[in-house]
Image (cartoon, rainbow, N blue to C red):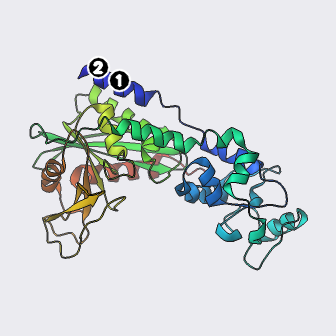
Amino acid sequence: MASQMKRTRNSLAGVNLPDLEAALRRLIAAIPAGHVVSCGTLAEVLGDFRAARWIGSWLGDHQHDPGCCCHRVVRAGGRWGPSPLSQEDREKLLLKEGVLLTSSGADPRCLMDAAQLRALCPEVATKSPLLELQALQVRLCREIRLCPLEREPQSVGGVDVSYRGDMGVAAYCRIAWPSGEKLWDTHIALPTRFPYIVGYLAFRELPLLQAVLDKAEQEGQLAEVIMVDGSGLLHPRGMGIASHLGLLLNRPTIGVTKTLLCGKCETEDLSPGQSAPIVYRDQVLGAVLRSRTGHAQPVFVCPGHRIDVASAVKIVSPLFGAHRLPEPIYWADRISRSLARRFIPQNR
């Protein structure tokens, strides 16, 4: 077991996170005058179309300089998107470069596709940084164990991360099980190195969670089971942040979310205290759960590592207080949000 834990820690610690912003800037710089590229096409070349939302946010907030070609990036179909430039300035630049304009943006005939962009920027296209991370997730997923919890815990920990600018605050709270009594908490603040992209949350938050849990372990406060504000097996590649963290700790982890990332379930007519299965790829990989206190909105629970669906529901069920989220996650969320607002200025 110790050798397996060492291998897992090494495999995760050795991840060389790609500099997505640098890769994105290289792609944008490769767009020739007279052409435009959509956020979706840029995301496709990076390796996953779901990165388009991050690209759109980045366009509106990035540090712009005179040599930046971000005016050549549009939304699907050539429609105008976020930009640090005024609409008038963008139109002038594109017209000067020979781009045909319509009332809503650039003429679709001026749009480049992914194959054309890959040919112009092979140094990014051949690596496809998000594809490399997907391959890592698929490889690590083979190490996940789905099994009943070996014994009832005395305590359960919850972790969450809140952000302000480029900084993140990770909070950990230890709760007695099954009473829900708050026992101990701690936090840590660190810069973030990876953007938020659906399906890749672990690469953004795992360094912060590892740091705060290392701190808890040093104080002798690491709970037997850890709840994570994020998904586990209910993930496109079966490797959500709860699963990553479980492998890293070699300890049972449970993913708890307010929204369902993957799978199907019935949420209507769910009575207080009831649960219903979540099916993904013909397997029951989670449960939708409504608290006994009768909160109108349920939560979605799934195993991360070294636990199964039934055990996860058993652990989560008694830990609801007066809130929608179970107490370990509620307190971790509340603490991290409060500290992020108080101590970290917004970077703009």
Residue at (37% x, 34% y) in the render:
210
Q: Which residue lies furthest to the bottom in this view?
A: 103
Instruction: Say if residue 208 shows up in the picture.
Output: no
Q: Which mark is residue 135?
A: none
Q: In this view, does 124 lie above or below 64?
A: above
Residue denoted by label 2: 3
Residue 10 can be seen in this image: yes
Q: 186 or 6: which is nearer to us?
A: 6
Give the residue drawn at x 20%, y 36%. 223
Q: Where is residue 204 in the image (x, y as percent from the top left)?
A: 47, 43
Q: Nearer the viewer, residue 217 or 260?
A: 260
User: Which three-letter amino acid code belongs to the residue tagged 1?
Assistant: Arg
Above or below residue 298? Residue 195 is above
Q: How far apart are marks 1 and 2 (CA)?
A: 6 Å
Q: In this view, does 244 lie to the left or right of 340?
A: left
Camera-side residue: 313 or 283?
283
The reply to whether the C-beta atoms of the residues labelled 1 and 2 are less than 8 Å apart is yes
Report the side of 292 relative to 140 (left or right): left
In which quadrant of the rendered image does the N terminus lie?
A: top left
Q: Residue 84 at x, y = what percent?
A: 72, 60
User: For mark 1, what is the residue?
Assistant: 7
> In terms of secondary structure, where does tag 2 sit?
helix
